[in-house]
Amino acid sequence: MKGKKPTVKLCIKPGDPMIPPERDGSIQNPRRWFRVGYSTGTTIYTFANFVREVNENIDANPAEGDVDDYHVYMWDNLWSHTNALIYNVVENWPGDRAKEIILRSPYQPKFDPTEYFFVNF
């Protein structure tokens, strides 16, 4: 299909050193979320829905022993990542945990585990 390409959304929640290695959420076994599709690219709405889905999953299925009081969201400065809707989804997510969005230059695998994944993919 003309104009369409594989589109991958990936989230990795860094592991907690206080969680034993064999458990989900540990440094050795970080939590991950994937969505793979074939589209014209990542839109504001598909990215916002992905962020919502990850947040809902973290809230509904906390890793045993994880203290989830601070979330850092890090992604590149793709236009669909910098839209006000995305900030609204993150900043207005219910709960007491602190939230921060960090924008970085694209394709910096040394600073973002998802980019390291894509480089090796």
Image: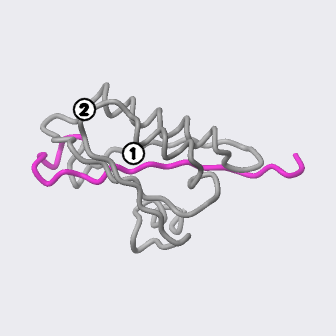
Left or right: residue 28 compared with residue 2 = left
Residue 19 image offset from top left, x and y in percent: 13, 46
Residue farthest top in this picture: 60
Where is residue 99? Give x, y as percent: 32, 48
- Establish if 65 lies above or below 80: above
Look at the image and say whether residue 3 sits in the magenta stretch: yes
- Disc 1 + disc 2, Cβ < 8 Å: no
- Residue located at (87% from left, 46% from top): 1
* Amino acid type assigned to the residue bearing label 2 in the image: Pro
The answer to whether residue 8 is magenta is yes
Q: CA distance from mark 1 to mark 2?
A: 13 Å
Q: How does the figure colour the protein chain or chains?
A: one colour
Q: Amino acid at mark 1?
A: Arg
| Most common secondary structure along the magenta stretch | loop
* Quadrant of res 47: top right
Left or right, 118 with reference to 71: right
Figure check: 27 above or below 47: below
The numbered mark at residue 21 is none
Stretch in magenta: 1-24
Label number found at residue 62: 2
Residue at the disc numbered 1: 32
Q: Residue at x 10, y 50 (%)?
A: 18
